[in-house]
Amino acid sequence: MKPALNPQQNEISIPAEANPMSGPRHVAIIMDGNGRWAQMRNRPRLFGHHAGARRVRQIVEACPPNGVNYLTIFAFSTENWKRTQVEVSGLMKLFQRYITKEARTLADAGVRVRFIGDRVRLNDKLVELMDSLESMTEKNDKVHLTIALNYGGRDEVARATKRLAQDVASGKLDPEIVDEETLPKYLDTYVLPDPDLVIRTSGEARISNFLLWQSAYSEYEFVETLWPDFTAEEFGALTSKYGNRDRRFGGVKV
Ligand code: IPE
Ligand code: IPE
Ligand code: MG
């Protein structure tokens, strides 16, 4: 069944009979190509970012029918501050606008929203909106939507290591017991399962500092589609394709 969106009512209606199949439980997306999408139309880059933001709702809606419980999207990287002041401040305004506009819809649709990344560099108003959307949706569990904002995988590991070292210094953590189960408890994603499938749009075949630790064994799909053109159908096709893959995690299939 196709999820129906009634634009008049501004509601996402998610069908209850989601079929988990053998699809990915957690999909992470590097939403790339907004700038090129705008350039192709002779419009400013921010026009592409607005079009890209509008795509998110359809992909969130497409999660339950494809058996996806966790969706993590890369919205702004720790390296994206290198862009022009016009683009960066336009993006920050867009994030505020997006949260304000979509909060009620997401909450009513049973979506639990979380943000990962370093909030220190973000403005107070935006952080306030992020905190309030997280608490407003904390009882939901139909879809876990995680938005990576001022996120960088290396930055995340560095921040985690710093806190781990502080716990060792204060005697709270015995360094002898630190292993690969310990560090992820300090990552921003500590409550999330690792992504099963990472999709990047726009034809670039790199991960650009996204979920470095968490995606060690993820499957990857690099597609040519620019993010503002990415549809629920393409998302569905990629999740079905994932079901046919053979994940061995370094072992041998018996
Ligand atoms: C991705 O689109 C969105 C952000 C990084 C904020 P881009 O803005 O990177 O689009 P291209 O890669 O220039 O086309
Ligand atoms: C990655 O895209 C970051 C986001 C999608 C938010 P970029 O466009 O910033 O990555 P590079 O510069 O092509 O590696
Ligand atoms: Mg890009």
Image: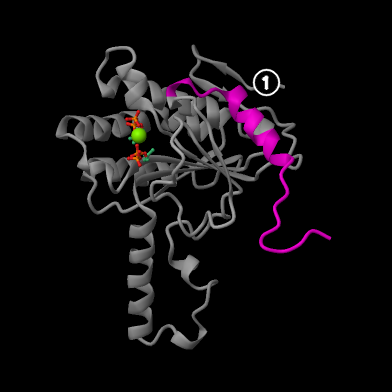
Colouring: one colour
Residue 35 picture location, percent across and down: 32, 26
The answer to whether any part of residue 49 appears in the image is: no
Position of residue 176 in the picture relative to residue 160 (left or right): right
Residue 101: say if magenta: no
**SS at badge 1:** loop
Q: What is the count of numbered marks? A: 1
- Tell me the kind of residue under disc 1: Lys
Q: Residues within 10 Å of mark 1 (few under 14, many from 20)?
A: few
Task: Name the residue located 72 percent from the left edge and 64 percent from the top edge.
Answer: 251
Q: Nearest the camera: 14 or 238?
A: 238
Position of residue 201 in the picture relative to residue 162 (left or right): right
* Image-quarter location of ligand 2: top left
Residue 246: say if magenta: yes
Q: Which residue is mark 1?
A: 2
Task: Name the residue located 53 percent from the left edge and 25 percent from the top edge.
Answer: 58
Residue sticking out furthest to the right: 254
Residue 26 drawn above or below residue 167:
above
Residue 59 picture location, percent across and down: 54, 29
Residue 244 drawn above or below residue 168:
above
Position of residue 24 in the picture relative to residue 118 (left or right): right
Q: Nearest the camera: 24 or 247?
A: 247
Residue numbers of the magenta segment: 228-254
The answer to whether any part of residue 81 appears in the image is: yes
